[in-house]
Amino acid sequence: MAPVAARSAGAVGVGVAIFISVALTTYLICDRRSKKKSMSRKNGVVEAIGNTPLIRINSLSDATGCQILGKCEFLNPGGSVKDRVALQIIQEALESGQLRPGGIVTEGSAGSTAISIATVAPAYGCKTHVVIPDDAAIEKSQILEALGATVERVRPVSITHKDHFVNIARRRASEANEYALKQRNLHLNDKDTAKINGCESDGYHYSSLFPSDCQGGFFADQFENLANFRAHYQGTGPEIWEQTNGKLDAFVAAAGTGGTVAGVSTFLQEKNPEIKCFLVDPPGSGLYNKVTRGVMYTKEEAEGKRLKNPFDTITEGIGINRITKNFAMAKLNGAFRGTDREAVEMARFLLKNDGLFLGSSSAMNCVGAVRVAQAIGPGHTIVTILCDSGMRHLSKFCNVEYLSELGLTPKAAGLEFLGIE
């Protein structure tokens, strides 16, 4: 007969083996169910927004000794992170009654938000009217028109000018409301004219802009509408936390409206105050100085060199010279400067080494991720946002001739442009 101790040890061994087998089986079943759920059929384009993959950017991770992870927002139905914002804004507007089915959503946008609105709005029976600066990549306007949006291209001017693209979009919403009221045979005088955010019609002959069955207008106001912040606080941030199992050390992103960096940073730091959140800022933008020195200031403005508003850079959709309501919500530990050349070189490096075809803001975010890795050292996990692909940047950021004219032809063999040999 075997000794008691031996029998006891054997029983324990069998028990442990059974426990491990059951645990593994349970895990595999749950994992399959989880994957099945994530791969399940979606109810329309709206349900396909969000829950984007978080991938390891191998080349940057290997070069820095950190795990640099990119959230693939370019895989949203509308092709960018702005799908989340468009969905949140439209849903909240419909719930509050500010927007009705058959209404027109107006927005001033450099492209991506407008494309997302034009993608989401039809799912709710709404139309889109976009005012876009005429120096934005032409393919963005072409995509918008293909999506059925009405597009106005206007010259870039200061946000304080009444004809800044955002201010025109605000007026168009008011005009759509006025037109809808007139179509309902409501005889209003000037003081009764419908307004959006205090802006009235400027006398524009807008009857040609809106369909006869227009049910009014709603100005999306992505810069100041906190639905932008909430889209990332309630969606992007929690997804990053879950996908990393809460094991991340830093988050970095550029800002235009500020909604992404604000929503994600606030959520992550509420979950773990030790997570460091950073801004990466393009040339001409004042946010870097605001974060690091508390003063909105750019060298370009001080020397009277600003060539356009709000900044002079090849990147699109990021950088600004004012604090928006969304950006004011951000919880940041610091900021880094990025240059046009770094963004261009980074985009080409990632295409060559990782097969990632990214747009200008995504490339700038990856520059920021490397800067964070250099600052905090190897062994850390850093997350950034891959906002959109290079497909809507073909005429400028990804155009060889255009880059050559600006002296930005990529020349780097590796990451030496960031000091990594």
Image (cartoon, grey):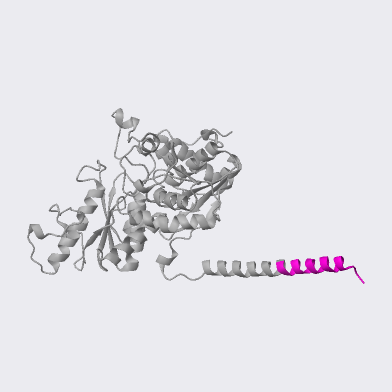
The vertical placement of 224 against 126, above or below, is above
All told, the count of numbered labels is 0
- The magenta-colored residue range is 1-19
13 in relation to 401, above or below:
below
Residue 292: quarter of image? top left
Answer with the quarter of the image where residue 339 lies: top left
Q: Is residue 243 left or right of residue 306?
A: right
Residue in the image at 54% along x and 40% along y:
373
Residue at 22% x, 61% y: name it.
Answer: 217
User: Going by the image, does 94 lie left or right of 186?
Assistant: right
Location of the N terminus by quadrant is: bottom right
Closer to the camera in the image, 250 or 310: 250
Q: Does 211 lie within the magenta span?
A: no
Q: Is residue 90 left or right of residue 334?
A: left
Q: Residue at x 32, y 59 (%)?
A: 89
Residue 306 horizontal/vertical position (percent): 30, 33
Q: Residue furthest right?
A: 1
Task: Name the image quarter holding the C terminus.
Answer: top right
Residue 189 sits in quarter = bottom left
**For residue 219, side relative to residue 232 (left or right):** left
Look at the picture and state if 416 lies above or below 278.
above
Q: Nearer the viewer, residue 264 or 106?
A: 264
Residue 191 percent location from the top left of the image: 9, 57
Residue 146 visible here: no
User: Magenta segment, principal secondary structure?
Assistant: helix
Q: Position of residue 69 (x, y in %)?
A: 54, 49
Q: Indicate whether residue 2 is drawn in magenta.
A: yes
Is any atom of residue 353 visible in this view? yes
Farthest top residue in view: 303
